[in-house]
Image (cartoon, rainbow, N blue to C red):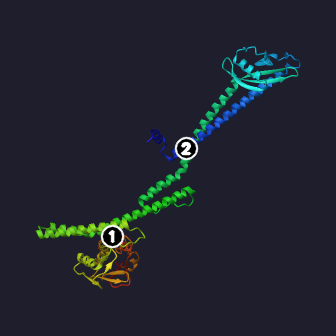
Amino acid sequence: MNPAFGVRRRLAPRTLRGRLSLVALTTAALLVAILTVVFNVVMQRHLQHQADDELRNRAAAVATTVDTSSSRVRVLETVNDRVLDANVWIYAGSRLLEKPPSATADSSLSQAADRLAAQRTRACATAHDHGHRPARLCSQPIVGRRATATVVTALDLAPYRASADTMLLGSLILDAVMLGCTYVLTRLSVGRALRPVRTMTDQATQWSTVGSEERFGAEGRPVELARLGASLDELLDRIRTVLRHEQQLTGELSHELRTPLTRIVMELDWWRARPRTDAETRAVHEVIGEAAQSMRTICDTLLKDAREHAPGRATAPGTTDVVPVLDRLLQHLDPPDQVKTAMQTAASVLEAGVAPALLERILSPLLANAIRYADSRVTVSARGVPGAVRIDVVDDGPGVPESFVGELFQPGRRADSGDGHDGAGLGLPLARRLARAVGGEVSYDPGHAPGARFTVSLPAG
């Protein structure tokens, strides 16, 4: 990296207000510098023209005292002779007739006057006297009938230069004041203009943290802020969606992992209750290992589904024979003594277009609810229909209250949270979401009585 670039980068303001103020100050300084140079050049030219006009007027006045009517040039004496002779040179051709009393022949002013007289035209030049003070000289030729003369007048430029220096100093002071005011006003204006942006940023940060429903909108805002508000609203919507999905995934994992964790805890409590034989210990290890493997499968299935299935996208990740999966799930159920389970299938082989682990995750919440609320019997039936596989989970329990049917598949909702059954209201929403992710559906039949009937429809394999 270029060291100079690194220094400039470190010295650059870190805030947008500081950078905009610096840009405004730099632009104003460049403009003011140009205007100051132009103004002072114009004023110097104007002062020089004033000096030249005064010199020509004096030369014209002196010319009235020069007689060129004869072959010999004569200088007439006048009442104001001393005034007219001050800094005046009169030449007859190239011959000097009169010069200022204080001027010497070898002085810089006299030499400049000689050069102007030799040109025999109207001309002006700048020279310095013996004190190195600037002086302006102008020549005025006088053409007579028989002779030609030239009048050269000189004027001290010190007062004009002093006026120019004063104007330059005044303009520099005025420039400094203007630049200072420009910087201060720019910072105030930019700070005021950016205040709504800062407020919107703080609100967006707060709303994104808590997943608020508040949004900025575009009404009553300038075009730029309206576009910023729309962008922030889209960002807040995406953040809220991510937070909702994250909370949903966390809740689903907790819900699904509860059963295998409960089996592990129960087996450990049973094993610790008294000394066990080697065979009993091995059996406990097998149950714990199976539950741990089930937990791993649950995590892998839900995390894979969260990664691969975006909203509105449906895929079929594989094929599965439904009958063995149903048989395995029923064998691992632990129903109360009074509840019996049964499976009915119309064919020995039913291929569904889903992976085995995903099919288990879809059916597990339905079976767990059926076992939890059944009075005496849970029946699982599977059949093939054109292009799909239908699986019914039926129990003879009290069924779903009619007033709760509309909220049955909403996350976190339970018909009666005080019914003595453990649950978080996440199983049915998870089953429906996973089924829809592969192009299937989970539905409830409100016309079935007594008890409840849930139907899983999956694409055929």
**Tag 1: residue type?**
Ala
Q: Which quadrant, please, contains the N terminus?
A: top left
Choose the circle earlier in sequence order: 1 or 2.
2
Query: Which of the labelled discs sits on residue 23, or is there none?
Result: 2
The x, y position of residue 235, in whole percent, is 46, 60
The x, y position of residue 350, in whole percent, is 31, 81
Q: Is residue 376 visible?
A: no
Residue beneath the point at 66% across and 36% down: 38
In depth, the one of 36 and 419 nearer the eye is 36
| Residue 5 left/right relative to 81 | left
The Cα atoms of the two marked residues, 1 and 2, are separated by 59 Å
**Tag 2: residue type?**
Val
In depth, the one of 169 and 3 nearer the eye is 3
The x, y position of residue 273, in whole percent, is 15, 67
Q: In the rendered image, which quarter is residue 267 located in? A: bottom left
Residue tagged by mark 1? 424
| Residue 386 left/right relative to 66 | left
Q: Residues within 10 Å of mark 2 (few under 14, many from 20)?
A: some
Q: Which quadrant, please, contains the C terminus?
A: bottom left
Residue beneath the point at 49% across and 46% down: 15
